[in-house]
Structures are given as C-alpha cells and as structure tokens.
Amino acid sequence: MVGLAHFSLLAITAAGAAAQGLLSCGEAQYNYTEYTCFDDTTLCPVQSGIRTLDCNGACYDPNKYTCSNTTLETYSPYNGELFDCGVARYDPSKYVCYDGDMLCPKSGVTPTLPCGDDCYFASEYTCTDGVLSHYAGPNGSDGTVSVLGQSRFPSKHEYF
C-alpha cells in the first residue's frame, strides 16, 4: 500500500509540475524561462536575459568566458584570440564549444544550445533526450520538430 501511495504522490507532483510548465532536471523541477538544464544534472540560471552555460558544474556567462577542457577562461571579443574545440578552432564571441568537440553559433550575445548533434535557440525549443520540441510556453503544447542542422565540425580547423 505504501508503494501505491508513493506512486500516487509522484503522479500528483508530476501533474502539478506539468500544469505549472515546469521541466525536470534530474530530481529538480525548474521553470524553462529562468534556467537551463545541462546533462540532466546542472541547472544554470538566465541572468539579465542571457542563458548562463555549464562548465564542469560551474555556470558562466558565455559573453565573458569560454570553457576550455572543463576550465573557465576569460576572453576579449576584440583581440581575435581563437580557442580549440576538438579539432576546430573558434572565436568564442561567435561560437560556444560544448563537450569539447561541438560548436554552436551565437546570435549576437545569445548562444544556441546543443541537442544531440544539433543546435537550437532556447527561446523557441526544448531538448529532451536529444529530441527538439517547440517551446510553446507554460500553457502551450509542444510538437516535435525536425533536425535544425549538423553542428559537429570534425574536419574543419578554423571558424571566425
């Protein structure tokens, strides 16, 4: 009987979270407009309209830092310094490197996020288990979308 009560409580909690438009990140529930979940373990906040990104458990502003080999490094968008992302070199004012080998472009100061082998705008889509869905807000319905484009660059060496 305890198992049934526990299951019912989980179902009620999940239904309540869904009604509020909350998503899951591991055991935590979060509002998609206020946080981004990375690897189902790390929640990073949206600060001043910018989604902070995960670097080895630390959240950072991608317009001030880049994550290189799980270490945060500052950069200046004015000096033209390039960083490594796998076999590619990139300008962190134009791209973000995820997992050490995946480049996703920025639109101005807004980074796109990884989903499987693709990149997406967090204001328009959500990613669950590598599948993109339209983000229709807390009261909308989501619909699966097609792939946005290949974003791994194993044979390229430099991006500006």
Image (cartoon, rainbow, N blue to C red):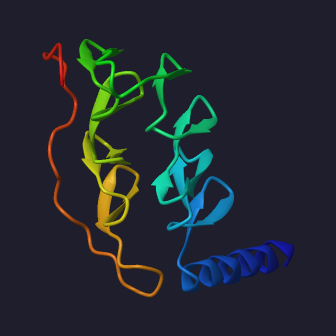
Q: Position of residue 7 (x, y in %)?
A: 72, 75
Q: Which quarter of the figure is the N terminus placed in?
A: bottom right
Q: Position of residue 89 (x, y in %)?
A: 25, 16
The furthest residue to the front: 78
The furthest residue to the right: 2
Left or right position of 21 against 154: right
Q: Which quarter of the figure is the C terminus placed in?
A: top left
Figure check: 94 above or below 138: above
Residue appearing at x 58%, y 83% in the figure: 20
Q: Position of residue 46 (x, y in %)?
A: 54, 57
Figure check: 154 above or below 140: above
Figure check: 127 above or below 135: above
Residue nearest the viewer, comparing 67 with 98: 67
Residue appearing at x 22%, y 30% in the figure: 152
Count numbered badges in the picture. 0
Left or right position of 155 against 2: left
Residue appearing at x 61%, y 65% in the figure: 30
Figure check: 61 above or below 3: above
Q: Position of residue 107 (x, y in %)?
A: 26, 49
Residue nearest the viewer, comparing 104 with 61: 61
